[in-house]
Image: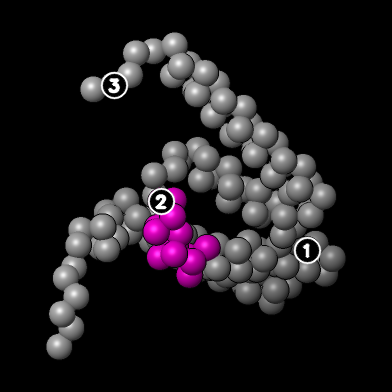
Amino acid sequence: MNDRKTHSRDLPSGDGRWQRLMLASSAIVFLVGGLMLAWLPLIDDGSRTFVSGTLLKVALVLGLTWLAAPQLERLGWQRLRGSLLVGVIIVLVLMTIRPRLGAIAGVLVIGGSLFFSLIGWFRSLGKPPRR
């Protein structure tokens, strides 16, 4: 028998389930698209190889994010704003396709996050404390 009590913080939230569902379904769509493009004779070989490889890399990144989702929930990733989460996924995709461009985008996302965090912190200094 397991004597461990289940707390509400141990259960995945509804938003977390939707985020994981979206990650998994997107990964499957990109994986199927990449595999289908690999065998379609409609496009020339160079373009087909590039697009198929790109879709498979994106599917891999999304699939790994889906697998890591339970650990990320413990870190509080479901509290991230949707726009920031989309930005992080775009940076990860850019890192897989074009590493230099992904690194620049990553620096911009981190710098922007720090900048807006500092603005929020300075704005909170001028307000009276919450009770």
Tell me if label 3 and label 2 are in contact, CB under 8 Å.
no
Residue under label 2, please give it: 76
Q: Position of residue 82 (x, y in %)?
A: 45, 41
Q: Position of residue 73 (x, y in %)?
A: 40, 58
Q: Residue at x 62, y 72 (%)?
A: 36
Residue under label 1, please give it: 50
Please give left or right for residue 130 compared with residue 81 in the image. Answer: left
| Camera-side residue of 17 and 68 | 68
Q: Amino acid at mark 3?
A: Arg
**On residue 130, which mark appears?**
3
Residue at the limit of the structure toward the right, as seen here:
46
Q: Earlier in the sequence, mark 1 or mark 3?
A: 1
Tell me if label 1 and label 3 are in contact, CB under 8 Å.
no
Q: In terms of image quadrants, where is residue 47?
A: bottom right
In this rendering, the answer to whether 108 lies above or below 39 is above
Label 3 CA crowd tier, 10 Å (few <14, some 14–19, many 20+)? few
Q: Earlier in the sequence, mark 1 or mark 2?
A: 1
Write the start and end of the magenta stretch as one range: 65-77
Dominant secondary structure of the residues highlighted in magenta in the image? helix
In this rendering, the answer to whether 18 lies above or below 44 is above
